[in-house]
Image: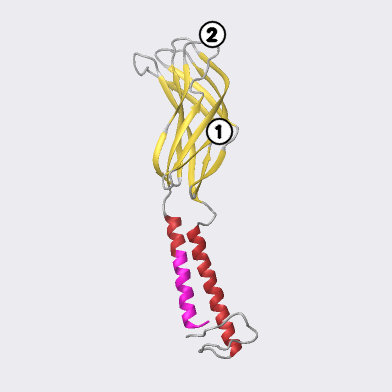
Amino acid sequence: MTHFGTRTLLATLALFVFTVGHALADPIYFDVTGNILPGNFSPRLPSGGGTASGVGNTYTHLGSPSAGINVANIVFQSGGSNPTVFDTQPLTLSIALHDVATNALGSLLFPGTFTGHIGGQVDGGLNADGIVNFTQTTQSLLLGNNRYTVSLNPQYSLAVYVVPRWSSGADYIHTSISAQVSAQPNTAPEPTSLTLAGIAVLSVLGGGLRHWCCQRAGCPWTFIYPRPSRFPAIAYICVR
């Protein structure tokens, strides 16, 4: 390969590597909003007056990767001295994602069940426990140029005991459901990357073909004309 071809090839490959590497190094920013449906769980009757409800959380402008996000809470509220029981009930954890760069929106739904119990107040204290099980723990979706993956634990055990009472009113206990949210550039090349890759491939093929043709023609420095009969479709230029 000639010196000119070598320099062109190296410059093209360097530009390609720099551009792709720069794009991969840029952080991916996104917003996350969690929500639990239904908002309130129905207690077993007769009820002791306690309540259990799902409350979602919102996080903005997170940079990838981001692990251990508290996407939602189960909030227990005391009802008095009598216990309250929540039999196994279906729930859905909704996680909405927003890709900041492209403004693309999407959401994932994780079905599960909730079982809980709020004990009666004893000596000014309150205890509550619950279990949340998810039947599907990992999902992903494509937003803009990035693929987002959300992973949950298959089970969350919610067990707390608070003493003394927080205030003279009802007691509230927040227990969290965390998720791991990560974002990675999509494996499919972007149009710019495809263009640069095409330039690099053409440079390699063109340089190699020019070198081979010049050697076959025995004329490494001059313009070959008329072109060799064995290559009727192409004219070749050999330069230093």
Q: Using the image as rendered, state which of residue 150 and residue 4 is in the foreground.
A: 4
The magenta region covers 1-17
Figure check: 92 above or below 42: below
Q: Disc 2 on helix, strand or loop? A: loop
Which of marks 1 and 2 precedes in the sequence?
Answer: 2
Q: Of all residues shown, which one is farthest toward the bottom?
A: 218
Query: Residue 54: which numbered mark, if any?
Result: none
For label 1, the residue is 110
Please name the residue shown 60% across and 32% down the image: 135
Please name the residue shown 61% across and 87% down the image: 228
Measured as percent of width and height from the top left, residue 36 is found at: 49, 28
At label 1, the amino acid type is: Phe
Please name the residue shown 41% across and 34% down the image: 58
At label 2, the amino acid type is: Pro
Figure check: 170 above or below 132: above
Q: Disc 1 on helix, strand or loop? A: strand
Left or right: residue 42 compared with residue 99: right
For label 2, the residue is 46
Q: Is residue 156 a member of the stretch shown in magenta?
A: no
Q: Is residue 9 a member of the stretch shown in magenta?
A: yes
Name the mark nearer the viewer: 2 or 1. Answer: 1
Disc 2 to disc 1, how far (Cα)? 30 Å
